[in-house]
Each structure stands twice: as C-alpha cells, then as structure tokens.
Image (spheres, helix red, strand yellow):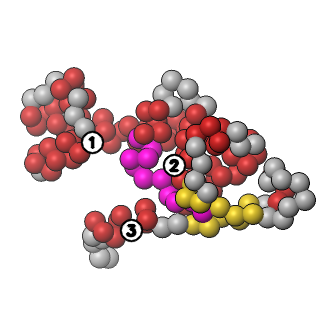
C-alpha cells in the first residue's frame, strides 16, 4: 500500500459534485428535477460552522449548505429561507460527498477532538497554559505541532 502525498489527500476538497434534486422536493410547482453543484466540506469549513453555530445549533444545516453550495452561491439569509425538506436533502448530499455520516453532536466531537489533542500536545511539549494555546491560530498550532515532532 502506497503512502499518500499531501496533494493527494487535499485533491478531494477541490472536487465539485453535480446533485440532482427530485422534483417532489423542489418548491417550484410543475417543474422537473433540478440540479445544484456542491463541494465537500473541509476541516476548516467544519470548524467555522461549529464555532458559528455554538450558540444556535439550528444554524448548522444552513451554514453547511452555504459553505458547500458552489452553484448557485447563496447568502445566509437565502439559505435560511429554503424549505426544510430541500434543506434536509442538501445536507444529506453534503454529508455524503464530504464523507460524513454523523449527527451534529458527533460532528462537533470529530472537529474539536483533534484540536483538543493538539492543544494538549502543545501544552505538554512547550509548557504552555491552556489559555496560551487557545490564543493561537490554527496555522500557528500546525507549525508548532510540526516543530514538536
């Protein structure tokens, strides 16, 4: 089994997926199926979504849709006005192309667990307090983790 390169691991995040939307869940009457183009969510997208929806978990789906939609691009207010059935369909498709099949709570855990481990490692390796580590950007955390290796 060959070891993948960083470029190979990142290649999937640039893919665009055309998605057919069944006519029965489209809000326009007497229209056939439609389509949109979505992209997989990245770790950065998920971190932003978790942080932005921390106080209002109901925002999670809308933010996922907004981040993943390539065509058409939509503002947050537009995404919030999408009918619930269509939103549910889009979130399911976004989860599928992103390789996610978890609940919102599990998603939060998956995003935050690596950060918690990284913070613990940096505190141990450099003797920093949790407050010092939490003040670092993701880029800084990655640089310091590389230095600790």
Packing grade of label 3 (10 A; few <14, some 14-19, many >=20) is few
Upstream in the sequence, badge 3 or badge 1?
Answer: 3
Label 2 belongs to which residue? 67
Local SS, label 1: helix
Q: Which of these two is toward me, 138 or 110?
A: 138
Please tell me whether residue 54 is drawn above or below residue 46 in the rendered image.
above
* Residue 123 placement: quadrant: top left
Label disc, if present, on residue 90 of the rendered structure: none
Upstream in the sequence, badge 2 or badge 3?
Answer: 3
Q: CA distance from mark 3 to mark 1?
A: 20 Å
Residue 99 location (% of width, % of height): 51, 57
Please tell me whether residue 108 is drawn above or below residue 24 in the rendered image.
above
Label 3 belongs to which residue? 11
Q: Say whether residue 44 is left or right of residue 18.
A: left
Q: Is residue 81 visible?
A: yes
Q: Is residue 40 magenta?
A: yes
Q: Residue reaching furthest right?
A: 30
Residue 120 location (% of width, % of height): 22, 34
**Residue displayed at 10% across by 48% down:** 147
Q: Say whether residue 71 is left or right of residue 118.
A: right
* Residue 110 placement: quadrant: top left
**Residue displayed at 9% across by 34% down:** 126
Give the residues drawn in magenta, as a range.
37-47
**Residue displayed at 62% across by 37% down:** 77
The answer to the question of whether label 3 and label 1 lie on touching residues, with beta carbons closer than 8 A, is no
Q: Is residue 52 magenta?
A: no
Local SS, label 2: helix
């Amino acid at each position: 089994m060959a070891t993948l390169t960083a470029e190979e691991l990142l290649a999937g995040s640039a893919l665009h997926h055309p998605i057919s939307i069944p006519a029965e869940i489209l809000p326009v009457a007497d229209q056939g199926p439609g389509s949109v183009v979505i992209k997989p969510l990245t770790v950065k997208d998920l971190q932003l979504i978790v942080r932005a929806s921390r106080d209002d978990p109901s925002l999670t789906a809308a933010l996922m849709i907004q981040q993943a939609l390539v065509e058409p691009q939509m503002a947050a207010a537009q995404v919030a006005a999408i009918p619930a059935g269509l939103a549910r369909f889009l979130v399911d498709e976004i989860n599928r192309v992103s390789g996610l099949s978890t609940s919102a709570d599990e998603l939060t855990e998956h995003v935050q667990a690596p950060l918690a481990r990284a913070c613990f490692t940096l505190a141990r390796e450099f003797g920093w307090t949790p407050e010092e580590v939490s003040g670092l950007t993701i880029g800084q955390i990655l640089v310091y983790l590389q230095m600790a290796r």
